[in-house]
Image (cartoon, rainbow, N blue to C red):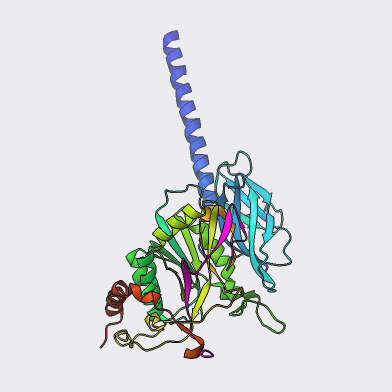
Amino acid sequence: MWRYLRFMFCTLSIFVWVAVISFSYHIQIRHQKMRLQKPIAIDTITALDRRTFIISPYYEPRLGQSVRVIAIIHVSVKELYCIFHCSSNQNVFVRAEINLHGDRFGFPYGTADLLCAEPSGCDYTYMSFSSTVSINTGQDLLFEVMNRSPQPISSNFTVCISTLFGNYNNVLQMVQSIEMYKILGASKVTIYNTNCSQDVDKVLRHYIDEGILDMVPWPIDRHLRTSTEWHYYKGLNAEIGYFGQTASLNDCLYRNMYKSKFVLLNDIDEMILPIKDWDWSSMMENLQNKHPDTSVFLFESHLFPIPVNISGFDMWSHVPGVNILTYHLRLPNKGKNFNAPKMIVNPQDVFQTSIHLAATRKKNSKNIGEDTAILFHCKTRDKYTVKDLVPDDRLMRYNLSLVPNVDKVIQRLFPQQ
């Protein structure tokens, strides 16, 4: 009898223990589901309020265990909070260190880093944001913290393009530029798109399907009055300059920080052309060997402002846009004038970037002379004439590869009737 009772007691104890564990597990799952029932942010730009716009949070192990949030804020914003949503169903508020970038160029809104230290003992995947400390976070959007589990580097070179706007319709130059990036060594191109024409959208879709392009929607004009001007002046009816260019560049830097060995920051009408080397890979190997303490390489811009018709390169006249192969006259740079350089950077060594320089970084920044490479800037400027320019046909050495590659894409997407 006692053996039977002891057996029944042990059996009942095991049953109760299993029931408790099962109940606890289901409670945790329920809490997790309840937590994830909050909407997850899917837009590239999300308004916290009228003064603060969140781009994306990125894990920042270089400054201790913390999160860096790329944001756009009004100059008056002085207090913001990161809310870490722990797996224990606890929400932990951490006051953000607000670092408004110095290159607002006089506009009331600018790019900012929000730095938030990880709370001790909090296992989290998502976070949200608040302008005040409040326990009522039921309506908060959840943002997934990116870069927490870096994968092996998958690209040698990624080109960051910011931004397409004004119903951008330069079809031919876009195709030529992307094909040139591929020849020079790009395995990824990231483009931030505010708006573009249907024809350009067709080109973007083609390269997305090919696997070389990441297209990031950039609806800045839904939130703020934008300007094509880079600096503010009295009477300008705009809140942020050049469609939030610096915010998109910083987001692109962090988006590709653990994916790409090097990141190039430039516009779609620009490309870094090696002089001594054929491609970026051999050029950067030589530059790194020569400057091992450098992580930011600056290439001065050289303007190619007017086209010259060349027989044999006019087969795409039915496609809208600039034909870069007809631009082989260069405006000489003068002395020590500022020549708007663009960059190739090691993203893991850069904390903050502007348009023409990396503001904060681990290692040195180096200006690279035009005997090594130039930034080919193909942009029509009617104020120049042939007598102001010098011949420069360095782009033409790529034409045997570039022309058939471009023609293949054009004939596929825009066949002549």
Residue at the spot 60% in from the left edge and 38% down from the top edge: 121
Residue at the spot 48% in from the left edge and 70% down from the top edge: 374
**Location of the C terminus (image quadrant):** bottom left
In this view, which residue lies farthest toward the left? Answer: 417
Residue 398 visible (yes or no): yes
Residue 115 or residue 311, whichever sits in front: 311
Residue 82 or residue 65, whichever sits in front: 65
Residue at the spot 52% in from the left edge and 56% down from the top edge: 347
- Range shown magenta: 357-385
Name which quarter of the figure residue 410 lies in. Answer: bottom left
* Residue 100 versus residue 329 in the image, above or below: above
Name which quarter of the figure residue 324 lies in. Answer: bottom left
- Residue 63 position within the rendered picture, expressed as x and y whole percent measured from the top left: 62, 47
* Residue 30 versus residue 317 in the image, above or below: above
- Residue 213 position within the rendered picture, expressed as x and y whole percent measured from the top left: 40, 66
- Residue 397 position within the rendered picture, expressed as x and y whole percent measured from the top left: 34, 73
* Residue 107 versus residue 38 in the image, above or below: below
Residue 145 visible (yes or no): no
In this view, which residue lies farthest toward the top? Answer: 2
